[in-house]
Amino acid sequence: NAGVTQTPKFQVLKTGQSMTLQCAQDMNHEYMSWYRQDPGMGLRLIHYSVGAGITDQGEVPNGYNVSRSTTEDFPLRLLSAAPSQTSVYFCASSLLIGGAGNTIYFGEGSWLTVV
Amino acid sequence: GQQVMQIPQYQHVQEGEDFTTYCNSSTTLSNIQWYKQRPGGHPVFLIQLVKSGEVKKQKRLTFQFGEAKKNSSLHITATQTTDVGTYFCAGSDLYSGAGSYQLTFGKGTKLSVIP
């Protein structure tokens, strides 16, 4: 059971370039999300999805696009990379269970540098 | 919107000393979760608290959920070098229209243990 798989692990981009961070989970989780982590800022939600075909914005969505064509995959697209997008990106997934809440499973992270 | 404050931001302790991190929410929570992130790693789920006044223990770790369900704490007894990392709390707003699957993370407490 692979859990949440993210690729690439490391990437250097030039300002203005676009790229896609891939995320896949094999746990049949309905909920998937992308976070960015910056020093002193904790984990900030970029976009999330509660099922195939459904996406919504989180706290810091600007400059990013997502799609959810299948339950398993949730790619994050950087449209025109900027130095402010230099960060560590985590994909995460969980079951959707009302009431008690859900454990979030994180991928291993993608270190992105924009120069 | 919901805010989750976590203090302290950093804590340096001598090996064998105790450590506590505190989490406070601006709103009443339906549940609170704790995660640990080792240096260079990804956040890993530790525990979830749901009931008012709940206390749970995992070996040297003690987790508490406040009576008003607006605060929580993580206490580590007799720290070891293996405890090094950043500890995050994350809460779901009890009255959020988005449902209990949406978590707001605190900024984390980074623990350093001096051998």
Image: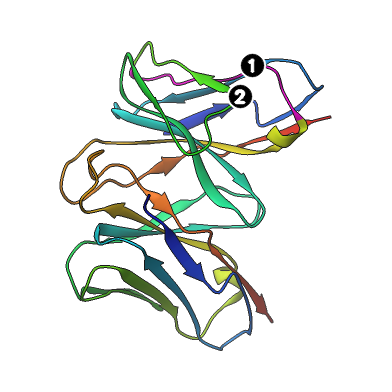
- Which quarter of the picture shows residue A62? top right
Q: Which part of the image, by quadrant, shows the C terminus of chain B? A: bottom right
Residue B24, position as x, y percentages in the image: 39, 69
Left or right relative to A78: residue B70 = left
Residue A1, position as x, y percentages in the image: 39, 32
Chain of the residue that carries numbered disc 1 in the rendered image: A
Seen at 34% across and 71% down, the residue is B72
Residue most toward the bottom? Answer: B17
Amino acid on which disc 2 is placed: Gly
Of residues A56 and A35, the one drawn nearer to the viewer in this rendering = A56
The mark total stands at 2
Q: Local crowd at mark 2 within 10 Å, few (<14), some, or many (≥20)? A: few
Q: What secondary structure is the stretch in magenta mostly built from?
A: loop
Chain of the residue that carries numbered disc 2 in the rendered image: A
Vertical position of residue A66 compared to residue A110: above or below: above
> Which of the labelled discs sits on residue A79, or is there none?
1
Q: Give the range drawn in magenta.
A: A71-82
Colour mode of the rendering: rainbow
Label 1 vs 2, first from the N-terminus: 2
Say if the magenta span includes residue A79. Answer: yes
> Which of the labelled discs sits on residue A63, or is there none?
2
